[in-house]
Image (cartoon, grey):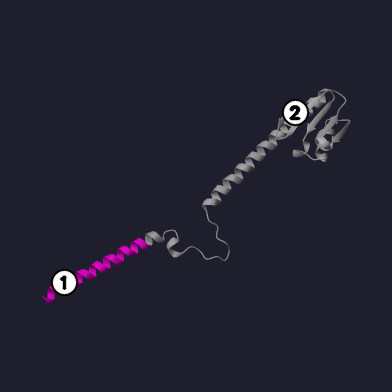
Amino acid sequence: LEGGGLSCRAMGNDFEITNWATLWSQEDLQTRLLEPLQGLKITFAVETATATLHFDNPHTPERAVLICNASAEAHRVKYAESSAILEGSAILSAGTPVQEKGAPGPRRSQRPGFQLRAEGASARRRAAEDEEDEDDEEEEKDEE
């Protein structure tokens, strides 16, 4: 497996993983690979970020490669999902302003439904003004 800087391979009786810390800790390598697969020992090369697990037969390192591949794929999928979730929430929050505690709320004219009520009030006011105008016209006619 190669990708994201991580690589693992079987070499005879050894299993070598480079950039192992991107996926596991030293304890993880010990308790999740070496011990369950009945390995002999583990060595670390700090300068190359490589861990080598030593086994007593050539088939066990091949099993370790399968475990490494599956773990790396699961990590990649989990990372992709969490990135998508974070990206999605960022998109949602970008369109939704968050009101800080104690901050004044939206103006009355910005509240949902206000526009409809305001339009209704304007229509009633115009109707009342029209009625007053009609009343004034009738009074003028009466005076003539």
Residue 99 within the segment the image draws in magenta: no
The label on residue 12 is none
- Nearer to us in this view, 4 or 40: 4
Quarter of the view holding residue 1: top right
Q: CA distance from mark 2 to mark 1?
A: 96 Å
Q: Which residues are magenta?
A: 118-144
Is 124 situated left or right of 95 in this image? left
Residue 4 location, x and y as percent?
A: 70, 35
Mark 1, residues whose alpha carbon is within 10 Å: few (<14), some, or many (≥20)?
few
* Residue, disc 1: 138
Is 64 situated left or right of 137 in this image? right
- Of pointers 2 and 1, the one earlier in the residue sequence: 2
* Residue, disc 2: 66
The residue depicted at 30 percent of the width and 67 percent of the height is: 125
- Identify residue type, mark 2: Leu
Is 79 situated left or right of 54 in this image? left
- Identify residue type, mark 1: Glu
Would you say the residues marked 2 and 1 are in contact, meaning their CB atoms lie under 8 Å apart?
A: no
Question: At numbered mark 2, what does the secondary structure look like: helix, strand or loop?
Answer: helix
Decide: is 88 above or below 34.
below
Quarter of the view holding residue 18: top right
